[in-house]
Amino acid sequence: MELKATLLRTRGQQDSGKVSMIELFFDLVFVFAVTQLSHTLLEHLHGVGWLQTGLLLMAVWWVWIFTSWITNWLDPERMPVRICLFVLMLGGLLMSSSIPEAFAAHGLGFAGAYVAMQVGRPLFALWAVRSDTLARRRNFQRITVWAVLSGAFWLIGGARPAEERLAWWGGALLIDLAGPWLMFAVPGLGRSSTTDWDVDGNHISERCGLFVIIALGESLLVTGANFSAMEWNASNWLGFLSALLGSIAMWWLYFDQGAEMGHVRIAQSKDPGRIARRAYTYIHMLIVAGVIVSAVADELSMMHPDETSFAGISALLGGPALYLVGNALFKWVSSDRRMPPLSHILGLLLIIGLIPLSYGRIYSPVTIACMTTVVLILVAAGEHIALRRPPPELDP
């Protein structure tokens, strides 16, 4: 049987790794998911709420990134793959709709949609590559086994009382996160290797960059919607400009150099699966989390200027900190650096230095937001200047 029958993407041709329109259409569901996550965190701004929303965020990211891996292998322009994506959109919309009540009345709805996607996707891929190499078929068999194992914990947790759900789902998520790290090892089926994950680096890097854009876009939507509903006074203008400049600085930190360096590194790598697993599957989760928490912080500083709770201040400082950590790690593993960028390390130290001032109630939320925005701008400017400085001339 011809390779085309396996529905695989063609490789090595011009634009073979280009993101398709249906993949962008699929991403629209996750615009909604990101909005749901930020609103859920804002409405449950306490310690348990942080844990719950963090768990839901990782589940949403896991669905999206695994789908991106599948469409990296399979051609989304072929009709069976296209129909699979439409079905996954239905599951994603149901899962996203369940987010606000995932730890209340809609726990089984969230878990059911998640498990259906996580198990159904590798089963479809296994059918799609039924005539391909044994190594590729074994890879999807192992992924399916791990998805079924974690799915049992997700479904049990969804059916249990709300107070028990966090423990069950935490265990399920640990299984999910451990899968790629342990190469989906299964007794009798062996374990995968990163060479089995022969991803197209151009495609995976572009897909992850687009998700960062989705998260940043949601942040801008929140900022604009909040500002339009407010009285336009000096304090509100300050919060609005701080949120806008913070989003611009975040875009700059990722897209000015980091995204392109990561793209070049994975596209030229002889083992792109290893980079895709570490830099894009795991580390990008921190980058997206940083944007979402920062969006919550922006809304706090604009709409809740008196919010000085521990959880509220944690969002104001934690969002930019998460984003810097994620970018620092991404740029570190995507380059030949011996350590993360110095500008990012200094930025994190500045944010840490704001902790006693913030939790000491010395400054208002809008002032804290302005200070973290200044830190992000300084880091972006410092990296931009450093990367464009010509290397020193060596003496002959």
Image (cartoon, rainbow, N blue to C red):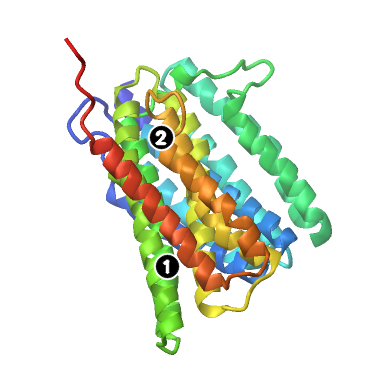
Is residue 293 found left or right of 328 in the rendered image?
right
Q: Locate the C terminus by quadrant.
A: top left
Residue type at the position of mark 2: Lys
- Residue at x-position 23% and y-position 27%: 391
Residue type at the position of mark 1: Ala
Q: Position of residue 93 (x, y in %)?
A: 51, 61
Q: Locate the N terminus by quadrant.
A: top left
Is residue 124 visible to the viewer in this orientation of the structure? no
| Circle nearer the N terminus (2, 1) | 1
Determine which quarter of the picture holds residue 307. Answer: bottom right
- Residue at the far front: name it: 395
From what the image shows, is residue 6 above or below residue 214? above
Is residue 195 found left or right of 100 in the rendered image?
left
- Residue at x-position 54% and y-position 52%: 351
From what the image shows, is residue 88 above or below residue 184? below
Determine which quarter of the picture holds residue 161. Answer: bottom right
- Residue at x-position 44% and y-position 86%: 229
From what the image shows, is residue 289 above or below residue 46? above
Is residue 46 visible to the viewer in this orientation of the structure? yes
- Residue at x-position 76% and y-position 53%: 166
Crowdedness of circle 2 by 10 Å Cα count: few (<14), some, many (20+)?
many
Q: Secondary structure at mark 1?
A: helix
- Residue at the far bottom: name it: 231
Crowdedness of circle 1 by 10 Å Cα count: few (<14), some, many (20+)?
many
Q: Which residue is label 2 attached to?
A: 331
Q: Nearer the viewer, residue 67 or 329?
A: 329
Q: Position of residue 6 (x, y in %)?
A: 37, 28
Q: Which residue is label 1 attached to?
A: 243
Determine which quarter of the picture holds residue 343. Answer: top left
Q: Secondary structure at mark 2?
A: helix
Distance in Å between CA atoms under marks 2 and 1: 24 Å
Q: Position of residue 9 (x, y in %)?
A: 31, 32
